[in-house]
Image: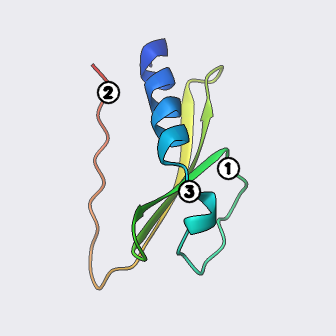
């Protein structure tokens, strides 16, 4: 179960670093998302939607790479 303060922290973080106009991916996101940010200039873009009632986070990540990528998710503590 996701703690309410964890969800608030994620939302606050996304609002602070939100740079919708700075997204570098040429590909359009598959769906409409609440938040977006450029994680690394011209290399990594993230879109996400947080559904608190369903305790669900949906995200889409676009990364320029020549190989594999790793993604880690951990609970906020």
Say which quarter of the image contains residue 21.
bottom right
Q: How many residues crowd around disc 2 within 10 Å: few (fewer than 14), some, or many (20 or more)?
A: few
Report the number of numbered marks: 3
Whole-percent x, y for residue 45 in the image: 48, 64
Query: Residue 43 lies in what quarter of the image?
Result: bottom left
- Colour scheme used in the picture? rainbow
Taking the image as shown, residue 50 lies to the left or right of residue 77, namely right
Residue depth check, mark 1 versus mark 3: number of the one nearer the observer: 3
Q: Which mark is residue 19?
A: 3
Work out which residue is located at the far bottom of the displayed protein and give it.
66
Compare marks 2 and 3 and give the one earlier in the sequence.
3
Q: Is residue 21 above or below residue 54?
A: below
**Of pointers 1 and 3, the one earlier in the residue sequence:** 3
Of badges 2 and 3, nearer the viewer stands 3
Residue for point 55% across, 39% down: 15
Q: Could you tell whether 31 is left or right of 49 in the image?
A: right
CA–CA distance in space, label 2 to label 3: 25 Å
Secondary structure state at the residue bearing disc 3: loop
Figure check: 58 above or below 53:
below
Say which residue appears at 49% left-offset and 14% top-offset.
4
Q: What separation in Å lies between label 1 and label 3 (alpha carbons)?
A: 13 Å
Contact? badges 2 and 3 (CB < 8 Å): no
Quarter the C terminus occupies: top left
Can residue 31 be seen?
yes
Name the one closer to the observer, 70 or 14: 14
**Residue 54 image point, x, y percent:** 63, 24
The residue to which callout 2 is attached is: 75
- In which quadrant of the rendered image does the N terminus lie? top left
Residue beneath label 1, please? 33
Pointer 1 local density, CA inside 10 Å: few below 14, some 14–19, many at least 20: some
């Amino acid at each position: 179960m996701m703690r309410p303060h964890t969800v608030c922290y994620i939302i606050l973080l996304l609002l602070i670093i939100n740079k919708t106009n700075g997204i570098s991916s040429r590909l359009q996101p598959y769906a409409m998302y609440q938040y977006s940010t450029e994680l690394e200039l011209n290399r990594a873009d993230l879109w996400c939607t947080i559904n608190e009632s369903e305790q669900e986070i949906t995200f889409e990540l676009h990364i320029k790479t020549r190989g594999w990528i790793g993604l880690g998710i951990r609970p906020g503590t």
